Image: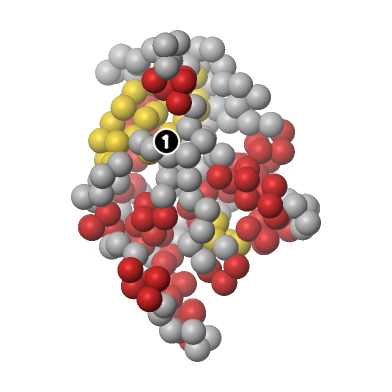
Amino acid sequence: MPFSSDIVQSRIATPLGEVRLAASPRGLAGLWFDGQRHQPVQALDGPAAWPQAPADHPLLREAAGQLAGYLRGERTGFDLPLDLDSGTPFQQAVWRALLGIRHGATVSYGALSRQLGRPLAVRAVGAAVGRNPVSVVVPCHRVLGSGGALTGYAGGLERKAALLRLEGALASLRTAHAQDGGGASDDDDALPLFAQAAGMQA
C-alpha cells in the first residue's frame, strides 16, 4: 500500500546519523536513518518529494524531541500517534506486534511469528520487520535471529547494536550467552559501543 499524499517531512541530526521524519495528519508515518534500506527514496528526495514541514510542525517537533530524549537515555518509550497505513494488513499486524516488545527486551523472529499465529511464516515476518517505516519508535531493533544473532536491521547492524546497548539488552544477551557456556564471540567484541557509534557516518 502506498503512503498517503498528505505527508510532510523533516530532517534532524542524531548521535546515530541524520534521520528523516515524516508525518501525515493521522500520525508519524516514517522515521528513517540516512542510507536505510527500504526507505521511500523518491518520496524523500525525488522530483515529487514530500514537502518540507515548517519548523514548528507540532508532531514532527514532538517526535524529534522524544527521539533525542530516548537517545540520551532519558526515555524508555514514545508517546506519539502513528500512521502505519502504508503497509499491507499483514505488515501492519507485524509492526503493531513490535510495539509490544518492551524496552530492554528482545524476541526472536521465530517467537514473533508464533505470537502472530503464523509459526511457519518466519521469513515473511522477517521481511515485514525489515520494512518497518518508523524505526526506533516501532522497535524492530529488538528482534534478533536465532541464538540472539544481530541480524536483519535495515538501518545497519552498528545502529542496532548501539540501540540495544542503550537499552541494556545487548549486555543481558551476552550475560545469558556466557551463562550457557557460549562466552562472548569475536563478532560481539567487534560491535561498536554507543559512544563510538555516535560518530558514525550515516
Q: Which residue is mark 1?
A: 32
Residues 26 and 171: in front is: 171
Residue 66 visible from this viewpoint: no
Image x and y of residue 114, in percent: 73, 58
Residue 32 visible from this viewpoint: yes
Q: Is residue 113 left or right of residue 34?
A: right
The amino acid marked with disc number 1 is Trp
90 versus 111 height, above or below:
above
49 versus 13 height, above or below:
above
Q: Residue at x 57, y 72 (%)?
A: 147
Image x and y of residue 174, in percent: 43, 75
Category of crowding for the residue at label 1, using alpha-carbon neighbours closer than 10 angstroms: few (below 14), some (14–19), many (at least 20): many
Q: Quadrant of residue 49?
A: top left
Q: Residue at x 49, y 80 (%)?
A: 177
Q: Quadrant of the C terminus?
A: top left
Q: Quadrant of the N terminus?
A: top right
Q: Quadrant of residue 104?
A: bottom left
Q: Is residue 37 left or right of residue 122?
A: left
Secondary structure of residue under mark 1: strand
Q: Residue at x 49, y 79 (%)?
A: 176
Residues 55 and 124: in front is: 124
Q: Residue furthest bottom?
A: 181
